[in-house]
Amino acid sequence: MVDLWPISVFVAETLALQLVGLDEDGIDVKFTISGKNKLDREKLKGESGIKTLKTQLQAARPKAPKDPINAHPTDMYKTLNEIFKEYLKPENPKPTTLIVLTNGLWPGTHPPNKLEERISQFVKEQLRPRQLDDRHFSIGFVRIGNEGKERLDYLDDQFHKDYKLP
């Protein structure tokens, strides 16, 4: 994502400007770049929230790695698992939309299908009766760049069939 960081920042800021007025308790930002999670922020609201987001995005900018193949090994399973666990707490039943800006390459996720298994498990947990609105939790993967297109296409088009999800 080093080369794609400027467009990632543009997309994140554009989405935030659209969403900041829609989420009553503010937007949250979580970084999956190894070592950058200390920059995560919650409940960003209004103009000050947008300013904080911009600051955090600049601070999270990945540096060009010495070894590009093993650089910034994102473990998307770990990140989504933490988000799912937090969401499933009884005190957090509000509808949530998770927007993931990604190149679709998550070399730190082992085995690679571990993420799909966790998403499937989470969806099945959501199908259990809960007193929630019609739309409980949605995930949108926004592809940045061209490298991980196949994986994101799979999640969009085939994943639910392979895991027998509605």
Image (spheres, grey):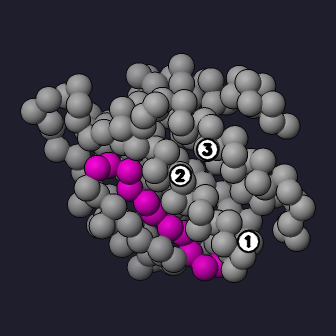
Residue 63 occupies quadrant:
top left
Q: Quadrant of the C terminus?
A: top right
* Residue 42 in the image, given as x and y percentages of width and height: 47, 74
Q: Residue at x 23, y 25 (%)?
A: 69
The residue tagged 3 is 118
Q: Bin the neighbour count of mark 3 within 10 Å (Cα to Cα): few under 14, some 14-19, many 20 and up.
A: some
Disc on the earlier residue, 1 or 2: 2
Q: Earlier in the sequence, mark 2 or mark 3?
A: 2
Q: Which residues are magenta?
A: 24-34
Q: Which residue is mark 1?
A: 94
Q: Are marks 2 and 3 in contact (CB under 8 Å)?
A: yes
Tag 2: amino acid: Leu
Residue at figure coordinates x 38%, y 56% from the top left = 31
Q: Residue at x 72, y 76 (%)?
A: 90
Provide the residue designation for mark 2.
80
Between tags 1 and 2, which lies in front? Answer: 2
Question: What is the three-letter code of the residue carrying label 1?
Answer: Lys
